[in-house]
Image: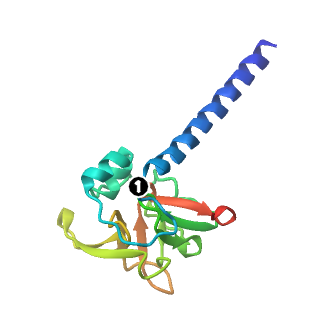
């Protein structure tokens, strides 16, 4: 009987914590007046303003160009059908049908949803020359693009999971 009470209490705790995590996620979007999955107007928001709105990890990667550790992102080995949006502003970025398996440690796609979904900028950090991929709406850093992807494009959009917001096909509202 005592084990049943402990097990029930533990289950209640897990359900409660899961609910709090969900609420924080929804609360974040409610506090971000720039987040929209339908508005496509380019944003000009200062990093000072973004820092007040975004969670620390997202701010560091999206606005300061940091990179999450390889193989730790939630979408690295993720294979559901749906759409990936910018976690900062809600801009539609990639369809799951363009995602492919790699061994690089980050979710990779062979093409963006539209030509305006992303922008590119030359990145010469770390003594390398690469093309940085930015959100086409809010200019947030998403990752980098490389020429070693599959057909039909031959491109690999190597993205940081923290910068992505996934919506399954069945919940696209």
- Secondary element at image label 1: loop
Q: Residue at x 49, y 65 (%)?
A: 85
Name the spot of residue 169 as percent of width and height, x first: 66, 66
Left or right for 46, reference 68: left
Q: Which residue is drawn at 59% across and 74% down?
A: 97
Q: Which of 108 and 65 is in front in this view?
A: 65
Name the spot of residue 12 as percent of width and height, x first: 69, 27
Residue 79 visible in the shown view: no
In what quadrant of the picture does the C terminus appear? bottom right
Left or right for 2, reference 113: right
Position above or below: 157 against 105 = below
Name the spot of residue 123 as percent of width and height, x first: 23, 70
Name the spot of residue 67 as percent of width and height, x first: 33, 56
Residue at label 1? 70
Q: Which of 82 and 77 is in front in this view?
A: 82
Q: Quadrant of residue 6?
A: top right
Q: Quadrant of residue 61?
A: bottom left
Position above or below: 165 against 102 = above
Left or right for 102, reference 14: left
């Amino acid at each position: 009987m005592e084990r049943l009470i402990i097990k029930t209490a533990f289950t209640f705790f897990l359900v409660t914590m899961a609910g709090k995590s969900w609420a924080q996620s929804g609360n974040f979007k409610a506090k971000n007046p720039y987040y929209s999955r339908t508005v496509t107007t380019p944003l000009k928001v200062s990093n000072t303003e973004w820092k007040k709105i975004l969670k620390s990890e997202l701010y560091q990667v999206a606005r300061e160009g940091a990179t999450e550790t390889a193989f730790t992102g939630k979408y690295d080995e993720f294979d559901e059908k749906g759409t990936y949006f910018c976690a900062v502003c809600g801009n539609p970025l990639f369809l799951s049908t363009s995602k492919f398996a790699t061994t690089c440690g980050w979710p990779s796609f062979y093409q963006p949803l539209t030509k305006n979904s992303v922008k590119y900028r030359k990145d010469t950090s770390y003594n390398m020359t690469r093309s940085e991929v930015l959100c086409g709406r809010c200019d947030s850093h998403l990752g980098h693009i490389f020429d070693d992807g599959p057909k039909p494009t031959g491109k690999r959009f190597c993205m940081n999971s923290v910068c992505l917001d996934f919506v399954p096909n069945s919940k696209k509202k």
